Amino acid sequence: MSSFDAPDLPSGQDAAAAAEVQHFLAEEQQRAAMLGVVSKLTITCWDTCVTKPGNKLSSWESDCIGNCARRFIDASVFILNRASKQGRQ
Amino acid sequence: MNPSLATPRDREEFFRAARAEASDQLLQELIQTVVDKCFVKCITKPSSSLTGGESACLAKCMDRFLEARTIVVKALENQQ
């Protein structure tokens, strides 16, 4: 959304219109965050799992990439949980 | 650019344009990533032109990378 300045809402704001825009921005932000994780993970797991690209991904490579992505999420959850526990001490 | 959001149609157009731009940006970033990754895999001894072998490697690499991305997307979808 880099070429868009903060949109002008009509003066005498329609609360429903504002909510609609708010909702859209929140949704897009969430989507962007998710796609950011996808991009980063694809790069990490490609580097980890694929050495020489062939005519198709081997089952070893496919399994590796899937496991890589799932374990990354597990590791994130683990670290977040641990950090929040430590925060309470 | 300062879009008016006064009418439902204005908002619809803004949403459409914002999504289209986000989509373009995503595609651009993806292509750049494929170029970076596949150059490293395929052009190990740069010569005076792109060889047939290098081109074939780039094509395979690009397809495999996109497949890898699909696997990641599916893995993340199921994890939620």
Image (tube, grey):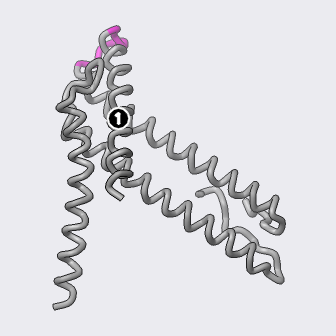
Which quadrant holds the N terminus of chain A?
bottom right
Please tell me whether residue A17 is drawn above or below residue A30 in the rendered image. below
Question: How far across and down, in percent of the image, does residue A39 sit?
Answer: 38, 47
Name the residue furthest bottom.
A89
Q: Position of residue A27 (x, y in %)?
A: 55, 63
Q: Residue at x 36, y 45 (%)?
A: B74
Q: Answer with left or right where residue A48 lies relative to residue B21.
A: left
Residue reaching furthest to the top: B52
**Majority secondary structure of the magenta segment?**
loop
Q: Height in image: B12 above or below B58? A: below
Q: Residue at x 21, y 54 (%)?
A: A71
Q: Is residue B26 left or right of residue B60?
A: right
Q: Nearer the viewer, residue A55 or A39?
A: A55
Give A81 or A25, whichever is nearer the viewer.
Answer: A81
Q: Which residues are magenta?
A: B45-52
Q: Chain of mark 1?
A: B
- Judging by the rendered image, the residue that carries numbered circle 1 is B36
Percent position of residue B18, x then y: 65, 54
